[in-house]
Amino acid sequence: MQVSIKWLKDYIDFKETPEKLADMLTMAGVPVENIIDPGAGLEKVITGRIEELKPHENSDHLQICTMNVGLPENIIIVTGAQNVAQGQIVPVAMIGAHLPNGMKISKGKLRGVMSYGMLCSAQELKLDLEALPDKQKTGIYILPADTPVGVPVKDLLGLNDVILEFELTANRSDCFSVFGLVREIAALTGNTPKWPAITLEENSSDKINDLLSIEIKDADLCPRFSCRMLKNVKIGPSPEWMQQRLEGAGIRAINNVVDVTNFVMIEMGQPLHAYDYDAISGHKLIARRSIEGELLHTLDDTSRKAKKDMLVIADTEKAAGLAGIMGGFETEITDKTTTVVLEAAKFYGACIRRTARSCGLASEASGRFERGTDIENTIRALDRAAQLLVQMNAGTVVKGVLDVYPEKKKPTTVDFTVEAVNRHLGTALDKQTMLNILAKLEIKAEEKNNVITAHIPSWRGDITCMQDISEEVSRIYGFDKITSTLPSGLALQGKQSEKQTFVDKIKDIMVGLGLCETVSFSFTHPSLFDKLNVPADHTIRKAIPIMNPLTDEYPLVRTCLLTSVMENLTRNFSRKNNDIKIFEVGTTFLPKALPVTELPDEHLKVAGAIAGRRNPVGWNEDNASVDFYDAKGIVEELLKNLSISRYKVEAGEHFAMHPGKTALFKKGRDTIFTVGELHPSAAAAFAINKPVYIFSADIDTLIKYAAKTIKSKPLPKYPATTRDLAIIIDTSVDAASIEKTITKSAGQYLISLDLFDVYEGKQIDAHKKSLAFSLTFQANEKTLTDAEIDAAFKNIVTALQKNYDAALRA
């Protein structure tokens, strides 16, 4: 947002310099980023008349100009320009001038003739070349014949102004207008604004209701829609003063109708749009959601396909423009336009923001709609625009105004007490001081039983609570007047929570196991649920939609960490990084109900994936790929280092994992970890053509079973004895059940049990398999005898024969 000092002074008088005013506004929370002098470098450039022009005797291209620049005597200037003629008025840079393009002017001799200045081109004056006719873009800039001599060029061209460039925060939408800034200046300086009187004479015999109709089909995206009409419109240039005001705001003049809509937008903060009435099919305008895929031919002469939930202004046949962003090409104002429809509306900011980003069409209008416009301002803005056009003799106003306003906005009130504001600010301001400040901001207030009720103006949508009132009081009172104090309260040592320390430990273990940590946005896309085979009724499909997503790729809040892991995995694969070992610790968000009425449940998860080679490429390494047991080993090592033991591993199912290659790590009824190969259909959906192994767990469940204290015992003094046990059992029996039986029947001296061989083949019956275990026995108080070990071994064999009909393998 930028605006000229002249424009501000049209509505309020102040004596402060631009620098002082900028400082006052910045300290009051309306930051001025830059102060621009558009006439910088033109201080010694004045107008001059060419009284005599003759060729240079010693040059075939130079000419000698005798210039009248308003001084007692004429001066001589030698020029090489060929587009000058005797009697013309041109800009003259006098000796000592330092032009905007960096050129310094001094007297000098050209081919034996002294020259006391320079004739200037538009480029040397840093004028906007695109706004000039072609003949003025090159050569010396020729001024109108009635231009007085000796006048500073910066005054003549309207460059004797100062531009304030603001870097406004999104919540101060009211300050994206001259009127809003004038209110701020009035509050800071104590001066009274001079608001323009908006009076309108409807001098056409026609009635708008007989000529045009409007409709809102989607009030959630367009809560108010208003229109006015002008007939007998004469398209032409706008007045010079308006062009200068618009140029100071960074907007190029086009024609009187378009310039007025831009002028009112900057002045009042309400974007307007003008339609050629004769190009509106059915003479009806409708604010509605777009139809998926319908064509939009916008003012930039580009055809676009509309996406779902875009807001368009349509006639009875087609979309006539993107609401709040850019109008349609067919209804554009042209030199042939004779009847104009002016539209002012209130649009839902999030919808405009999404559409603008999707189409890459950010504009002055869309920026204001995104931040929020004053819904009560539409009719007043239309009247102001019509008034300005009438003053230019550009048309006659049709009687009446169309206004669809289904649900009127309720006035905002905020209750507060003086004590609450002072407590919030750490001040001791009296009630009258606060009331005076609010009055300066045009906030009416009334008191009852020591409670003050503030009636918030419609243009201040950012004020909704006592804290906002406190901010208004403090910034107008002056932040520099509020005494700085140290925070008070109990001094507590800052440290990580146990959960944060536990998470850090998981990350350290994972990195130590050779995995790389990834960090992702906590957002996702519904298509990822389909790719991961998430059932239609699964809770993780009930994700919270984001009102204002960063991109169309992330419209939902994440409910499953595997979606982020798979995105990172496929992104690496697409960049030829095929050997992947990654993990992520992140939060998932599960709503209690949709739409959301309370904060969702947050669950911290850990998930990861591995794929590709087991070892780095090297002359002494093979090309073996990772398999299920690599992923299972990572999980086992992690649990070991987290001091989680006595869990069981069993075959299980997970929607994203291969049904025959999925293992569940369980303690009691809780699944503490799930690990398995990516489901073939999921791999195909992600266009992955190699085995991928994934794992996931809930952090809270891991914390629940992690040992809270670590017990130590001395190293054994007595030797251990190892026995091998090979048994033949049915293939349907899993090794975990066998290990559980062995542990239970072995007695107190069994300290370790390892499965070291599994065999199925010709030497044993069909539907049978051989499992070979290594059993280690040891006692802390003595050396075990063969008889003691034999007894334990016999108990194991007996239990296995009884429970599983196991047979010893010879």
Image (tube, grey):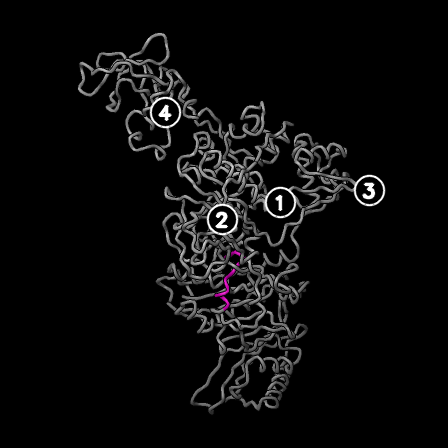
Q: Is residue 521 above or below residue 685?
A: above
Q: Nearer the viewer, residue 373 or 281?
A: 281
**Looking at numbered disc 4 in the image, what kind of residue is underneath it?**
Gly
Residue type, numbered disc 3: Asn
Label 3: element kind: loop
Q: Given this view, does label 1 or label 2 mark the residue nearer the observer?
A: 2
**Residue 324 numbered tag:** 2
The kind of residue tagged 2 is Gly
Q: From the viewer's perspective, is the residue at label 4 or at label 3 nearer? A: 3
Residue at image coords 52%, 28%:
5
First in sequence, mark 4 or 2: give its number: 4
Residue density around tag 1, few if under 14, some if 14–19, many if 20 or more, within 10 Å: some
Q: Are marks 1 and 3 in contact (CB under 8 Å)?
A: no
User: Of the residues shown, which amino acid type is indicated by label 1?
Assistant: Gly
Camera-near label (2 vs 3) is 2
Residue closest to the far top: 72
793 relative to 83 in the view: left or right: right
Q: Which residue is mark 4?
A: 102
Residue 25 sits inside the magenta stretch: no
> Residue tagged by mark 1?
461
Locate residue 583, reporting x and y percent. Answer: 51, 61
Assign a secondary structure to mark 1.
loop
